[in-house]
Image: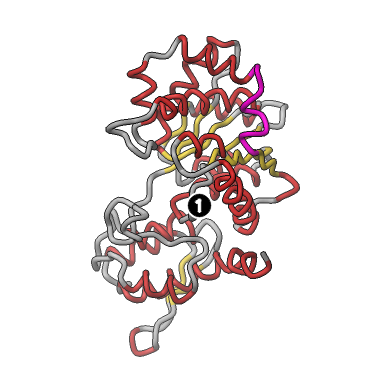
Amino acid sequence: MDNLTLITRNTEEIVTGEELEALIASSKRPSAYVGYEPSGKIHMGHVLTVNKLLDLQQAGFRITVLLADIHAYLNEKGTMDEVKKIAEYNRRCFIALGLDEKRTDFVLGSSYQLDPKYMLDVLKLARITTLNRARRSMDEVSRDAENPKVSQMVYPLMQAVDIAHLGVDVAVGGIDQRKIHMLAREGLPQLGYTAPVCIHTPILLGLDGKKMSSSRGNYISVDDSPEDIKKKMRGAFCPEGEVKDNPVLSLFRFHIMPRYPRIVVKRPEKYGGDLHYESYEALESDFAARKLHPMDLKTAASEYMNEILKPVRELMVVG
């Protein structure tokens, strides 16, 4: 698989594809980043962007992970001390998920976001950004979109300036980050910085087929026990033959198949024996044709997800 195919697989949008191709073709070593609020459990929705960082790392990019403690504080996710403790746990989780510690820069937001030059750039961006634009940029990721605090309006401005001050070429995020990234692409050149290439990943549905939510508990957390994952998978929404918005198939497409070039769905001989797949498309085709039963798919998903998350659980025991 060539680098462009590797980088663009399982993405929702590239802004822009031409700029990404030019970056890959350049003689410089490119860099990419994702910012994470240290605000609680890491679930497979977060891991979707980690997977993209793994692809970029494999393609030769230098990776920066921003552990955005000040962002989390501004977004009312805890005290500074609380979010810093979670940030360290998040760092260890990302390494356990496969990021090469020697080729990844883990940066705490508070290590540079209070510097005078950074803050002056935030204020400069504030001068050219309307309140409505800032609010629209934050609506998808704020805790209280109906009645946001002023601090939450500062959030997207800081996120844009982060890209400049971290010196990265590519900003990676879920498609819910698009408005903030477009603010960065439009605003940073006016401050004398280069507009970033933006890579957006899809937003995963929860295991119940509805929007993923911590209150519903409809997600797999990276520290779920094997028993927890098996229980969650047994109850997962997975109508026979239905491919669209199927959260179990999404686990195979975005998390399992990119890590395993060949998978086995184990079945008793009386039901036809084991099935072998070397591509997601073949797996999806068999499921759509009802050659693969939902319970067999769920059982296989449980086995592979437990294998993927085993290093994180081992890390927790050591930690």
Q: Which residues are magenta?
A: 108-117
What residue is shown with label 1? 47
Q: Foreground residue, 78 or 158? A: 78
Q: Quadrant of residue 108?
A: top right
Colour treatment of the image: secondary structure
Q: Foreground residue, 55 or 272? A: 55
The picture places residue 185, in percent across and down from the top left corner, at 49, 20
Please say if 49 is above or below 120. Answer: below
Residue drawn at point x = 33 percent, y = 61 percent: 207
Q: Foreground residue, 102 or 136? A: 136
The picture places residue 238, in percent across and down from the top left corner, at 28, 65
Classify residue 42 as left or right of residue 97: left
Q: Which image quadrant: the C terminus?
A: bottom right
Residue drawn at point x = 34 percent, y = 60 percent: 218
Please say if 258 is above or below 141. Answer: below
Please say if 250 is above or below 230. Answer: above
Residue drawn at point x = 34 percent, y = 25 percent: 136
Indicate the amino acid at tag 1: Val
